[in-house]
Structures are given as C-alpha cells and as structure tokens.
Amino acid sequence: MAEDESSRAEQEEALVALIEHRTKEVQHLRQRICYYQSQLAEAEGRLQDSQSKLANLRGRRISFSSDDASLATKRAKLEQRVIGAEHIHGDSENQQSRTKLLIPSVSPAISQPMNSGGLVAKTNIPLEKTAASVKVKVEESNLSSMDIEVVEIKDRGTKRKSEQKELVTLVESRSSPTLIGPYSSNIIPSQHKRKLRGLSVCPVNDQLFVTSALDGLVNLWKIQGRGSSASLLSSTLCVSPGARRWPEDIAWHPHRNSLFSVYAVDAGDSQISVLNLNKKGRPHVTYLEEKPHVKGIINSIAFMPWEDTCFGTGGSDHAVVLWSERDENVWNPKTLHRNLHSSAVMGVAGLQQKKIVLSAGADKRIIGFDVNTGRADFKHQMESKCMSVLPNPCDYNLFMVQTGVHEKQIRLYDVRSMFTELHSFGWKQESSESHSALINQAWSPDGLYISSGSADPVIHIFDIRYNACTQSQSIRAHQKRVFKAVWHNSLPLLISISSDLQIGLHKE
C-alpha cells in the first residue's frame, strides 16, 4: 500500500512538472503569435500607405499630356524606383537578414547577394554618431611624458540602448549561413610584455578600447582610419597594491570614461580597482576599500543593464556580489549568494528586462537570481562546466553559455524556457590543448552573430540562424591562440587579442 502511494506521489510530481513546462511553452508560443500579429499589422499599414502614394502619383501623371514621351519615360523610371524601394523595405523588415556590423538602433541592412567567392558583397555602412561628446587631447611627445585629458561636455555620456527584437524565432532557421566580410587584417604590437588577458571597447567613446595583460598594464588605444589602425595613448600599471597581481577581468563604466578591474583576493588584497581617464594628466588608479570576496580569484565582472548603476562579480569562493554605486568611486557591495554554486563562479551577467543576475559556474550550473525577491528565480544543471554567460544585445530573452564540451562550446537558451536548449554549436580544436576558460565570446551589435577566440590561431564566427553545429566562417590572422575578438559598436570592425602579443584589427 505504501509503495502504491509512493508511486502515485512520484507520478503526480512528474505530471505537475510536465504541466508547468508545457504551460511555459504555451505562453511562449502565444507571445510569438502576438509579436507577429503586431508586425503584420504594421507591415500592412506601410504597404497601404505606399500603394496610396503610388496611386496619387499615377493620377497626377495622367493629367499631363499623354503624348509627352519624355514624361512617360520619367514616370516609368519613377514607378520602378518606388516598387523597388517597397520591395527592399519589405525584405529588410520581414526577413531580418542583416549581414553587416551595425548598431542595433540602426535599421537593418539589406541582405547582400553571394559573390562567386561565397562571401557577401560589400556595402557602405553608416557610422552612428557616438552617444557621448568626449574629446581626447594628446600632446605630441613620447609615451612616457604623454598627458591625456578627457573632457566631458554632456552628461557624462550615455550607454547605447539597443532596440528589443525577437531573435529567438530565427535561431536555427536556415540551412546555410549568411557570411560577412571579406576581412582585411592589420596586426599591430600590443606593447605588452606578457600574455594578454582582457579586451574591451569603450561604451561612451567609439574611438577608444583597452587591453590588459599579465604584466599588469592596461593600455588605452585610439582607433585610427575607421579601424585600419590604432595608436597607443597611455599605458598604466594596474596591479593590486598588495600581492601585485594583474587584472583578471575588466569592464568599462557604462556612463563614464573609467575602467574597473578585478583581482585575486588572497592575503586580504584589494579586490577592485578603478582606472579614471577623466582626470587631467595621466590616468589615475584608485582601489575600493570593500572586500566581500573571501578567497581565490574574482573571475568575472560585468555592469548590469539597469537604470541604477551597479556591477556584479563572481569568484572562486562560489560567491556572486552586486556592487551598487553610491557616489563616484564609492560602491556598496551586497553578496547575493554564496551557497547556490558548489564551485567557482566563472561568469556573471544581468538581464535587461528584469533584475535577474545570471551566473555560470564550474559546477555545471546556470543560476538566475532575482535581486528584488532575494532568491533564485531558476536553476539549470548542465552536463559540463560553464565558463561564461552572455546575454544577447537585442533579444533580452536570449543568452549564450560557454561550456567545456568540444565542438559544442556555445549553447543558446531562452530565459522563458530555461530547460530547453535552443541550439548548440562549436568548433573542432586542432591543437591538443584543453579548452580554456580564457577563450571568450562576444555578440555582434545586431545580435545575429557570435565571435569566439580559440586555442588555435583562429577567430570563429557563428550565425545563430544557421542550423548546423559548426562555425559559419573563420579568420586566420594570429600566430598563437586567440583569447577574444570583440565587435566594434559602429564600425565594420573586429578587434582581437592573442597570446602572440599582437592585436588584430579585422576590417570589412
């Protein structure tokens, strides 16, 4: 009798879980239906508007003399341009097959035909004006005596806000990838003496990016010639004050020209440094007094995409900490959780539409922690260790997880149905070296592509619409393994760093 009751309870529990899963699935499908209904209504309105304009235009033309051959010719050409414009507009709205590197707020570019070499034909890409009005004035002198003055003119600058798009429905929707490029690569010396570790593009000034390395230096670069080259503006020693450790990870402040670095925290050393680039003279480094992490390495730092400025850190002590800004260089840390992960936290990120902090752990767990309720919103167990988590810049429900499985290093998930993997893809590693947590990925600004470094001297690019499990294309430009390749916000440019101590500028 007891066994029957136990069996009945297990069946009931399984059915409850199944109902919950299918309820979420139904809700997700309903959201898709609502989205496409609204898109259809807008498209029909635009079509009717274009048709009425064309009818009015034809009516006015008919009122003129019909035997005027030159006017008839002009009318035919005009009609062809109108119809062609409508066709192009429809393609860009409905197919969403953009292939160029544009800021999400810019209208999607038109799909380009494949040329004989299999690459996309070139088009001119508009450069969006930078969101922050900042200037970098550099004296013409040697680097050792160079003074940098960053002048803020308007409201400290603002981080770009991408337009929300429904990209989940496009995942794995095509049998062939849409290629981008071709790329021309320019390799320049990084000016670091040891292996590079970090790379980040400034969110408030498109001309600037930084690199960090095991030598403890943070180098500030200025992009030249629309991405054809870069010049070194400053080199600042940013080691921790006690153990003299290098930055493990770096992140720009979303509204200021300041860079945050995290370190190993053993022996009570400082955990966060702030490299301020707004001061007159050489860049100035300060260290935060708070020390919420208790041991090991802080593996990840990421600013949250919320109105109130804050950033999260994840460390080898299994902890996820949220740091809230009280004043400039005054931050209040709060430990969100220390026991939900049973191993090192390798990556942290924030969801745009809800105050949830995602964390990826070496314990094979993905956890979404709700800051408002103070508890985990969801937990997901993977089959291999997780080394990073990265939300899509355009579809706020879509995010990727980097895992340690060869040829399936990248996994895509919808936060609304966490237990269903949307797609997985990766690359076959040529070297015998094990997969490294130092290999990082980055989203393209339009949210359709992912770039990844590799243990080989190759940059891999993935089209999330491609239904295969392999990369859509690769770029060979370095001599040793590539740690990271990031997309520029407004230029058709990829920037990469490698253990060959070189920086790659890959321009379309």
Image (cartoon, grey):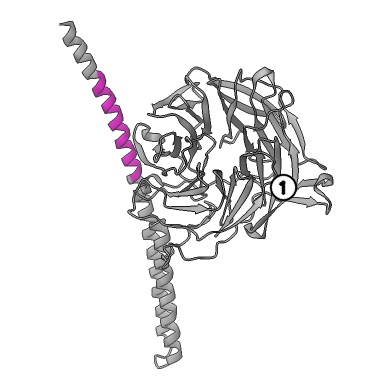
Q: Is residue 16 magenta?
A: yes
User: What residue is drawn where x is 18% and y is 8%?
Assistant: 3
Name the quadrant containing residue 237.
Answer: top right
Looking at the image, residue 331 lies above or below residue 144:
above
Look at label 1 and name its amino acid: Lys
User: What residue is drawn where x is 32% and y is 36%?
Assistant: 27
Viewer-closest of 364 and 2: 364
Q: Which stretch did the figure color magenta?
A: 13-32
Tell me the chief SS of the magenta region: helix
Looking at the image, residue 268 lies above or below residue 168:
above
User: What residue is drawn where x is 37% and y is 65%?
Assistant: 48
Name the quadrant containing residue 187.
Answer: bottom right
Residue denoted by label 1: 154
Q: Is residue 501 magenta?
A: no
Q: Does residue 295 appear left or right of residue 139 in this picture?
A: left
Residue 307 in the image: x percent, y percent?
Answer: 59, 36
Residue 168 in the image: x percent, y percent?
Answer: 39, 44
Q: Does residue 481 appear left or right of residue 468 in this picture?
A: right
Looking at the image, residue 183 lies above or below residue 233:
below
